[in-house]
Amino acid sequence: PKSSISSSSIFHSSCFYSLMANSNGSTTNNNNDLKPKFLKVYYDLKSDLLNDPSYEFTDDARDWVDKMLDYNVPGGKVNRGLSVVDSFRLLKGDEMSEEEIFLASTLGWCIEWLQACFLVLDDIMDGAHTRRGQPCWFRVEKVGMIAVNDGLLLRNHIPRILKKYFRQKVYYLDLLELFNEVEFQTASGQMLDLITTIEGEKDLSKYTLPVHRHIVQYKTAYYSFYLPVACALLLSGEKLENHINVKNILIEMGTYFQVQDDYLDCFGPPEVIGKIGTDIEDFKCSWLVVQALELVNDDQKKILYENYGKADSGCVEKVKRLYKVLDLEGVFSEYERNSYAKLTSSIETHPSKAVQAVLRSFLAKIYKRQ
Ligand code: GRG
Ligand code: NA
């Protein structure tokens, strides 16, 4: 089943990458050489896993895992992974030791491992064809449904990495619980997304604001926005239960980010968003259709029900025209202004200047997309 939530969620659009690029086209990174250092850590972690003393690899087994990891783990934008290092640097307030850079990078890669697991499994569920500019892993010759098992392996690599480098830390249990919790939230969000789009039961009346919000928060905001900062907090010796507020703020930012993604799918110029949106044709549970359903009169509702989810340019045009009539552009700018103002004021009330800096850095990245 195709995922119902608009396009592909958080950190997806190529414009997110471009907003992180400065005028020279290079990636903005206050601590100049953090990204190369981060990228190198992948090879250390892969080598640890391939030489795991508790498993006797055959040459073929080692070779498979090696290729599977290279195919699925690096090669994305690594926004989530790098966010751990960036956030930790802001929390520390000064230079990080080489050891600290390594540990922060390792936690960042654990998130990228989780991401790889999600992508491998999600592409199977979606029947997708390409991912990161190459065939989906399960489409690769000889892989097929072995990809399901590879997804499980990717997930199981995370506690092995954590055990090797964090076993002695006082926050070890908190880290394990954090990853377990976030995995549960993501899989639950994925489930809701899947069951609202069961083939043959497609029904616009299931698309409501609370459902949209629930899917976005569980399926993407926890692992994409909260998890990187939670890892950085644990690494700085903070207790997560003292940061419920930080969690709420990040979940709110993740929600806004997805709403913006939904909005741009329809209203963003293709040359800016790097793709031609197809949320309307694909019957996605986009923020736009959910807002439209709130605002329509009976005649307009009929137009929506008759034209949404049809792969026909005339139908798509009718839906877009209705969005204009309902002034969804205005509704979006209003939502954007409100959420920015709310987030800014919650950030200001936070007692720690360092935590404020972390939250502001996320805010600056996501509210500057256009
Ligand atoms: C782990 C047991 C278990 C179940 C997981 C598969 C699943 C249940 C959930 C997956 C839902 C999910 C998060 C799908 C991926 C969403 C997606 C396409 C994200 C794209 O993120 P980007 O743009 O990608 O950051 P890159 O390529 O940059 O990493
Ligand atoms: Na990424």
Image (cartoon, grey):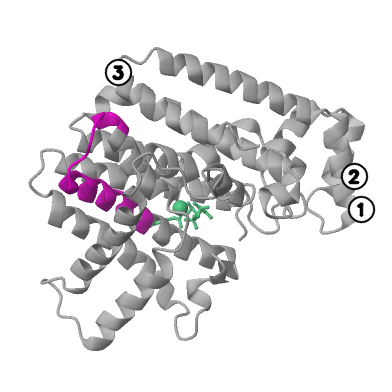
Answer above or below: position of 54 versus 24.
below
- Element carrying mark 1: helix
Is residue 244 one of those drawn in magenta? no
Is the residue under label 2 in contact with that under label 1 (CB below 8 Å)? yes
Q: Which residue was labeled with disc 1?
A: 314
The percent coordinates of residue 146 (x first, y second) are 40, 77
Classify mark 3 as within 8 Å of ligand 2 or not, answering yes or no: no
Q: Count the numbered circles shown.
A: 3
Q: SS for tag 3?
A: loop
Instruction: Give the residue type that dot 1 points to.
Output: Gly
Name the image quarter holding the C terminus. Answer: top right
Q: Amino acid at mark 3?
A: Ser
Residue 279 in view (yes/no): no
Residue drawn at point x = 58 percent, y = 69 percent? 130
Residue at (11% x, 50% y) in the render: 167
> Which of pointers 1 and 3 lies earlier in the amino acid sequence?
1
- Choose top left, top right, bottom left or bottom right for residue 257: top right
The residue drawn where x is 66% and y is 41% is 262
Which range is magenta?
90-113
Q: Which residue is mark 2?
A: 318
Q: Is residue 107 magenta?
A: yes
Residue nearest the observer in this picture, 252 or 347: 347
Q: Residues within 10 Å of mark 3 (few under 14, many from 20)?
A: few
